[in-house]
Amino acid sequence: MQTLNQTLESQLISNRRLLWVLVARDLRARYAGSGLGIFWSVVHPLIMLVLYIIVFSTLMRGSALRVHGVVAGYAVFLIPALIAWNWFYESLIGAAGSITGNANLIKKVVFPSAILPSINIVAGAIPFAVTMALFLVFAWFMAGFSIVSVIYLPLLILLETALIIGPAYLFASLNVMLRDTSQFLIAALQFLFWGTPIVYTPEALTVPFPWLACWFDINPFAHLAGAYRDVIIVHRTPMLGSILYIAIVAIISYHAGRTLFLRSRSHFPDEV
Amino acid sequence: MPAIQVRNLGKRYRAYSGPMDRLREIVTGTPPPHVREFVALEGLNLDVPRGCALGVIGPNGAGKSTLLKILAGIVDPSEGDVRLTGKVASIIELGAGFHPDFTGRENVFLNAAILGYSDKHARSIYDEIASFCELGRYMDMPVKTYSSGMFVRLAFALAISVKPDILLVDEALAVGDAVFAHRCLARIREMRERGVTIVLVTHDTNTVAQLCDRAIFLDRGRLAGDGPPKDVIHLYLLNVAERLTTLGENGPQASKFHEIGALETTSGTGEKRFGSFEARITRVSIEDASGTPAIKLVSGRPAIFRMVVHFDRQVDNPVFGVMFKNRYGMEIFGTNTLLRSMNTGAFKHGDTIQVSFMLPLQLGGGVYSASFAVHTADGHFFDYRVDTKLFEVLGSPETIGIVNLPAQIKVSTASTDLVSEDDLFDKIFSDAPQRLDMGDNAEPFLTGEWYAAQRSDAVWCRWLGRQGRAFISTPDGCLAIRIRACTYEPLAVTEPLEIEIHIGEEKMGARGITAGGWQDIELELPQGHHPRIVPVSLRARRTWAPRDADPLNSDTRQLSILVSTIEAIT
């Protein structure tokens, strides 16, 4: 009876050890049977980093961009926002299928379902953190050490986590009722990806299409991408407005996701 | 304070017309106006005292599994209160939390975490789990490489490692090999003796009868019976029989049943009856060997089960059958004229006939029910009287168990070097005749695949399967052994059916039997044969089933030749 009456937060806190075990299960299952095992989660991002840097900074010289007066190679421009996006993307796609993909646990075992959507967030944070750390070292090596990135990066990671959680629980619950949700999500995230200044600078689009500035203002991920670049490349404090805006969107979406999850939770055993 | 307390428990499932309906309800909090509700459980009150083993039985969809899931905390009740005192372990499905790519060891630790154990605790129970499931080195292999039996062993060992105060089990033990299933039951029994409260959901009334000290019977979500397992099981089985009747009423055969007769049930002995009643069983009786009606019969003695059937329409070759069940409703013995390939003949409107089943009542002591039926070969029931007569078998003081097999016990010296096989035959088959006619009297002297005695061309004979032995005594001066046999195998017309024959140790070679009438095979005994009991072994080179030769024939027995006599000739 216990598990069914607990709130989302208390279930997460009281089952944090189980969460870790399941994150470990998730990571290990991904590489089960392979020789390098969990090291692949470091090898993949490392290869990605090296290839981006080689392709964009060495092979395609001259594609350097100006970001707030700082000249940066395209790879350096691209990577912080891209790895932040990858974590966001992988977490949401994983979370959307987390309830439906664990029907056995939901139906046959006394199990705190509230930890399932969080598993992918935590599991995705590990390659994200590894890549970010490697890139940070690379950036320092190229442009010199900056205390700004050390101070603000944890804040941005916290904000991104907050921004992921709400939609994660929302889509996890929705996907139980509407199985099209995860496919819809994949499509929608494609649009969001190209609608966010990740592979291009905001100016690249707002100069020819001024009305897009409005869209970038309401797109929280545009603010987040900008903030990551501010901290890592420009070495300046992210804009307060961006941070507040992301925090507000995160709180609202968290509330929505949490409410839908708690209300639909008792339907899970019937539907999965 | 009882271990489990259930008050006015109800569970309703809503049949939503689509996923959007359910979503709308979740978002707005009010159910759609036109939604249909399905009641899984209703108004259930239950107190299970500590240490009680409760069996939950009922037909599919009665709410058994829902109850268990609510007790386990997997499913929310719609209304009412459930209170469990103590640590609860549930086995809804064995191995539900397993990851196929992980080794047995890793899965133990993964599931220990799901159960909420600390790492230290998980390590401390690991050895116990490993020794109970006896998987040895397989513990370090991925569980996807396990056989289903191994998987179940590990899962059960893990499930009971919780050392619960309350154990909830759902049918999970029906899988795995028999030896392990037995061990699981033994472990559950042991837990019960230690004072663990057990709730067992199952279809298997035998398990409930063996394991539980109380049973409840759920029917359409309601408590339909509660008490000692024996009584509740009886109630359940009656209900199943009734359901069979109702099924007949609403099922695909409905039109047939309503053509002439109406459905009818008679109470009293608890008899259930259904069919179209185009032919009716008007009277049934059970008689002892002397033909005196009796309800108490002696184990091992002959008995006659008789029914009188009245036909209200013309019927060709109806099937007459009888079935005995024990007090748990387990089918102990049944036979009918179809299984025996008997042609019962043609009957016309107004005929009244009598059918007698004569048999030695080789059952263990206890109360049994007899059911009688008249139906067609394709399963259209004219009249099925289920559990129409109860009879008691007075057990033999010489035997125990549910059947009373005619056993003979011989005790002899075990110094095998002194007792040759021949001597042994002389002892065991000491009264073997010189001439064996294949009637019922021959039974004690036959081993191997011989079928029941039957009459053909006015002689007693019986079919041989692939191989069989007959023991006959060979007197002084015996020269040969003669076997009278024939075959109806279609192939034998062109190609004789070859039978390989051994007498004692001696191989006598093979003889062919051709189709068409009785033939004698004579086998000369070797010189210097001394009088003794000899086994005559017959081994057919091929067999056939009448079914293969004629698709309309229901006889699927594997046959070779038909033998009428085996005799030693001087």
Image (cartoon, rainbow, N blue to C red):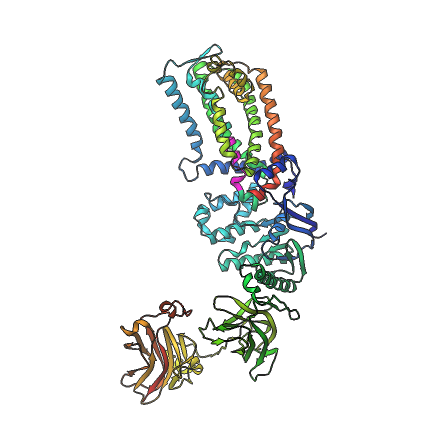
Q: Would residue B535 be visible to someone looking at this image?
A: yes
- Pick the front one: A193 or B56: A193
- Pick the front one: A13 or B316: B316
Q: How many marks?
A: 0
Residue A6 in the image: state x and y as whole percent. Answer: 65, 38
Residue B416 in the image: state x and y as whole percent. Answer: 39, 76
Q: Would residue B128 be visible to someone looking at this image?
A: no
Q: Residue furthest right?
A: B1
Q: Is B471 included in the stretch rendered in magenta? A: no
**Quick check: B167 above or below A37?**
below
**Quick check: A205 above or below B552?**
above
Residue A84 in the image: state x and y as whole percent. Answer: 49, 24
Question: Quadrant of the rendered structure where residue B280 is?
Answer: bottom right
Question: Quadrant of the rendered structure where residue A117 is?
Answer: top right
Quarter of the image with the C terminus of chain B in it: bottom left
Question: Quadrant of the rendered structure where residue B20 is?
Answer: top right
Q: Majority secondary structure of the magenta segment?
A: helix
Residue A179 in the image: state x and y as whole percent. Answer: 52, 38
- Pick the front one: B140 or B149: B149
Q: Which residues are magenta?
A: A91-102
In the image, taking residue B515 as reference, residue B230 lies left or right, namely right
